[in-house]
């Protein structure tokens, strides 16, 4: 393994999912649903396969039907106008979108600011691009609103003459924080003032709870032309195995991201692209039910974890709950997660691996709630054995 990747071993998601399989535990670690997305969309994929749509290389930027559907979705939900031919790119999941955006836009030695704790591929992709990551840490708060907050002064202070790009993620994995209009406005002002590009990972755009609202960064003044926005059918339609993601951005940025993408995968997921085009056109009722269902699951798991003795940071979005294991007298999340399956047959993920300084998240453990109610109930009753 070369020096750029030397610090990145196996991803924590693979490690913990393997542990779930080898111990026969309930897997609340890796974020994937245990119920597949809508039947009619699965049927649409079957139809595409049967009719011979997408069985050979689809067009480089993605099939026209899906690019049109992505543009229509951004317009319908957020009032954002994108030209499907020049401002939309289909990718192999959001993972490839992140990689291609960073490989295309970061020069060696550029600094990339990312909100910490960060999704693990951000650090690896910044490294592969030869850049330097600069974390800005979201910190726990006890008053209302987000359980983890961005300190805007810290963000401003992190920008240097070498900063190229801000890598934003809202709703935020793993903390569940949804950035507010005030925070996003401050980010936008900073980006404009310091002439920074922004890559914004909005894969959990449809998973926001209570009165939190997802506001795409590209809707803020001065941002449309400097923002690369990333979405994913894996998250929005519960098809993580299909690996269909997309990017929306101004033509110059799309052209750049596409230049990298064409040498990563060239194209992917032919028939699934047609099915996802139909999914994006589902009525608002689908998105409303998806959100309400997950809000209920958040409460179910959150209550169960609290009853089992965890300190729970209530998420405003995503399908993850971050907890603290200090009440158990435990300090090391990684060690805790390694023995959790043996102790009670449940798998979770240590947030410490999402920090540059693992001490910062030493006692945080993340649980996914995109699971059947009975699975969540069984998991929390098993976790009661910990006390
Ligand atoms: N970004 C974030 C914040 C994620 O949590 C995930 C997946 N869990 C991804 C990107 C990757 O999405 P995809 O599966 O579409 O590649
Ligand atoms: N994004 C998912 C999570 O945070 C996992 C995706 C993966 O395994 N790469 O759990």
Image (cartoon, rainbow, N blue to C red):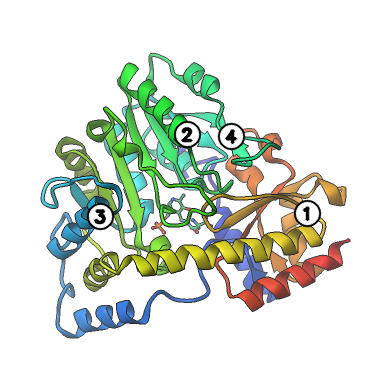
| Residue 114: assigned label | 2
**Viewer-nearest residue: 155 or 100:** 155
Q: Is mark 4 within 8 Å of ligand 1?
A: no
Foreground mark, 1 or 3?
3
Report if the CB atoms under discs 2 and 3 are less than 8 Å apart: no
Check the image and name the residue furthest to the bottom: 50
x, y percent for residue 277: 23, 66
- Looking at the image, is mark 1 or mark 2 earlier in the sequence? 2
Report if the CB atoms under discs 4 and 2 are less than 8 Å apart: no
Q: In the picture provided, is 209 more to the left or to the right than 367?
A: left
Give the spatial CA distance, label 2 vs label 3.
29 Å
| Residue 310: assigned label | 1
| Residue 76: assigned label | 3
- Looking at the image, is mark 3 or mark 4 earlier in the sequence? 3
Residue 9 showing in the rendered view: yes
- Looking at the image, is mark 4 or mark 1 earlier in the sequence? 4
Residue 103 showing in the rendered view: no
Instruction: Kindly identify the residue that appears in the image at 58 percent across and 75 percent down.
Output: 372
Q: In the picture provided, is 344 more to the left or to the right than 162?
A: right
Instruction: Kindly identify the residue that appears in the image at 26 percent across and 83 percent down.
Output: 46
Give the spatial CA distance, label 1 vs label 2.
28 Å
Foreground mark, 3 or 4?
3
| Residue 197: assigned label | none
Report if the CB atoms under discs 3 and 4 are less than 8 Å apart: no
């Amino acid at each position: 393994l070369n020096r750029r990747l030397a610090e990145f071993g196996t991803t924590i998601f693979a490690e913990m999912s393997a542990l779930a399989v080898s111990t026969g535990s309930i897997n609340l670690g890796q974020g994937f649903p245990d119920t597949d997305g809508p039947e009619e969309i699965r049927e649409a994929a079957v139809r595409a396969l049967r009719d011979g749509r997408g069985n050979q290389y689809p067009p480089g930027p993605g099939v026209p039907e899906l690019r049109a559907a992505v543009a229509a979705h951004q317009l319908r939900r957020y009032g954002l106008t994108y030209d499907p031919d020049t401002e939309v790119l289909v990718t192999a999941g959001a993972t490839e979108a992140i990689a291609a955006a960073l490989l295309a836009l970061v020069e060696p030695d550029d600094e990339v600011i990312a909100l910490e704790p960060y999704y693990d591929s951000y650090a690896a992709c910044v490294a592969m691009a030869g850049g330097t990551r600069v974390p800005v840490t979201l910190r726990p708060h006890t008053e209302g609103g987000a359980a983890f907050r961005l300190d805007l002064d810290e963000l401003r202070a992190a920008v240097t003459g070498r900063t190229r790009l801000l890598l934003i993620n809202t709703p935020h994995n793993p903390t569940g924080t949804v950035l507010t209009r005030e925070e996003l406005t401050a980010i936008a002002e900073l980006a404009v003032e310091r002439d920074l590009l922004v890559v914004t990972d909005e894969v959990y755009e449809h998973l926001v709870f209570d009165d939190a609202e997802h506001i795409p960064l590209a809707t803020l003044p001065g941002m449309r032309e400097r923002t690369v926005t990333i979405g994913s059918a894996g998250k929005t339609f519960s098809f993580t195995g299909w690996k269909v993601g997309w990017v929306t951005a101004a033509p110059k940025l799309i052209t750049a991201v596409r230049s990298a993408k064409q040498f990563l995968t060239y194209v992917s997921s032919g028939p699934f692209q047609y099915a996802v085009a139909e999914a994006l056109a589902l009525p608002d009722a689908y998105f409303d039910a998806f959100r309400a269902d997950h809000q209920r699951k958040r409460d179910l798991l959150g209550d169960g974890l609290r009853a089992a003795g965890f300190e729970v940071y209530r998420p405003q979005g995503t399908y993850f709950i971050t907890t603290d294991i200090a009440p158990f007298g435990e300090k090391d999340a990684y060690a805790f997660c390694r023995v959790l399956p043996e102790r009670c047959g449940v798998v979770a993920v240590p947030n410490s691996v999402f920090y540059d300084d693992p001490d910062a998240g030493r006692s945080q453990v993340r649980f996914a709630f995109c699971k059947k109610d009975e699975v969540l109930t069984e998991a929390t009753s098993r976790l009661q054995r910990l006390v």
